[in-house]
């Protein structure tokens, strides 16, 4: 029915055994593009960055991440410029997120050639419904024959620009700890990393740190409420039921909030798998005031 709106997350592709997990699928591809275990050094909030990769991209820890500069201190005794600016080039050689992302998405989409429709999911979907998918793949189009004009790939799709990262505005790097007297025995002072960078006197070192923080900041994705609104307006969607399948409900809150406000009388159905996802959904329902919601365990 045309009054149904589906929100599709990565769990949907995983239900078809597509290689779309951050660990190991994206991790294995991403590490191929790195020279210094960049992602292992990136943050210290969690033991494993891959457990909440997108959100943790906004929490770099330069106390650890600066290790990519080890062994590349500018050599002012050398006549070669490359012995001084090699520290800057380390930023270009590391953190190649986009290259990894496109290979990851292409590989998953190519896997659709050997995928069959899932009978349970087939019963849930509606060929006349509208779809907001947070996935890059064309599972809906290729496996279930959903017309492309009824689908919005909110983060991009294979063959087009792809977006991955922390929600824009949520960049909160760890405090930087440095030896104030530079003698190796403290006292150590905690300060914002950008304030520390402003105090670096060496041109090459300052440039390297500045380029690195700029690269980390670039790992964000836009919140595209205008894109979502345009899709719904164009299709003149009068939504009575919103079905959420495969979304962790641990990110993308702005979209849920917008839809709840726009369709305040709609019925919500959340399909969940596991205690963690169920907990996320309960938090979402309570904190965003979704009044008419049901949860169905898979």
Image (spheres, rainbow, N blue to C red):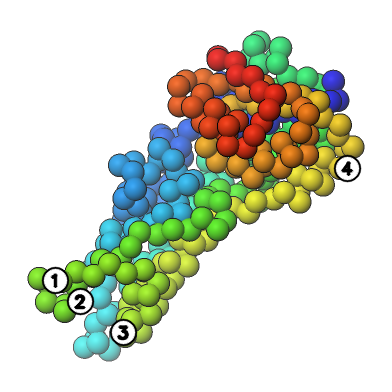
- Mark 2: few/some/many CA within 10 Å (<14, 14-19, 20+): few
Residue 180 has which mark?
A: 2
Nearer to us: label 3 or label 1: 1
Mark 3 — residue? 202
- Mark 1: few/some/many CA within 10 Å (<14, 14-19, 20+): few
**C-alpha distance separating marks 2 and 4:** 59 Å
**Comes first in the chain, label 3 or label 1:** 1
Nearer to us: label 2 or label 4: 2
Q: Secondary structure at mark 2?
A: loop
Q: Secondary structure at mark 4?
A: helix
At x 60%, y 49%, the residue is 163
With respect to residue 119, does 200 lie above or below?
Answer: below
Mark 1 — residue? 186
With respect to residue 66, does 87 lie above or below?
Answer: below
At x 25%, y 76%, the residue is 73
**Comes first in the chain, label 2 or label 3:** 2
User: Tags 1 and 2 in contact by the CB under 8 Å rule?
Assistant: yes
Q: Position of residue 212 (x, y in %)?
A: 41, 67
**C-alpha distance separating marks 1 and 2:** 7 Å
């Amino acid at each position: 029915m045309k009054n149904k709106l589906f929100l599709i997350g990565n769990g949907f592709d995983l239900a078809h055994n597509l290689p779309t997990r951050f660990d190991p699928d994206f991790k294995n591809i991403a590490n191929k593009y790195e020279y210094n275990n960049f992602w292992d050094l990136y943050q210290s909030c969690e033991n494993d960055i891959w457990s909440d990769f997108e959100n943790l991209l906004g929490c770099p820890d330069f106390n650890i991440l600066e290790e990519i500069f080890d062994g590349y201190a500018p050599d002012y005794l050398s006549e070669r410029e490359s012995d001084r600016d090699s520290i800057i080039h380390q930023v270009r050689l590391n953190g190649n997120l986009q290259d990894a992302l496109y290979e990851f998405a292409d590989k998953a989409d190519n896997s659709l050639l050997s995928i069959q429709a899932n009978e349970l999911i087939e019963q849930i979907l509606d060929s006349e419904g509208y779809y907001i998918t947070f996935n890059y793949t064309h599972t809906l189009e290729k496996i279930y024959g959903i017309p492309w004009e009824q689908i919005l790939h909110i983060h991009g799709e294979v063959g087009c620009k792809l977006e991955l990262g922390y929600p824009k505005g949520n960049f909160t790097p760890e405090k930087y700890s440095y030896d104030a007297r530079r003698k190796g025995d403290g006292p150590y002072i905690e300060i914002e990393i950008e304030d520390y960078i402003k105090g670096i006197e060496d041109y090459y070192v300052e440039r390297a740190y500045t380029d690195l923080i700029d690269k980390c900041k670039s790992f964000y994705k836009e919140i595209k409420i205008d894109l979502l609104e345009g899709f719904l307006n164009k299709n003149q969607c009068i939504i009575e039921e919103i079905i959420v399948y495969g979304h962790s409900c641990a990110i993308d809150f702005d979209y849920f909030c917008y839809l709840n406000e726009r369709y305040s009388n709609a019925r919500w159905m959340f399909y969940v798998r596991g205690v963690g996802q169920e907990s996320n959904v309960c938090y979402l329902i309570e904190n965003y005031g979704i009044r008419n919601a049901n949860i169905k365990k898979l």
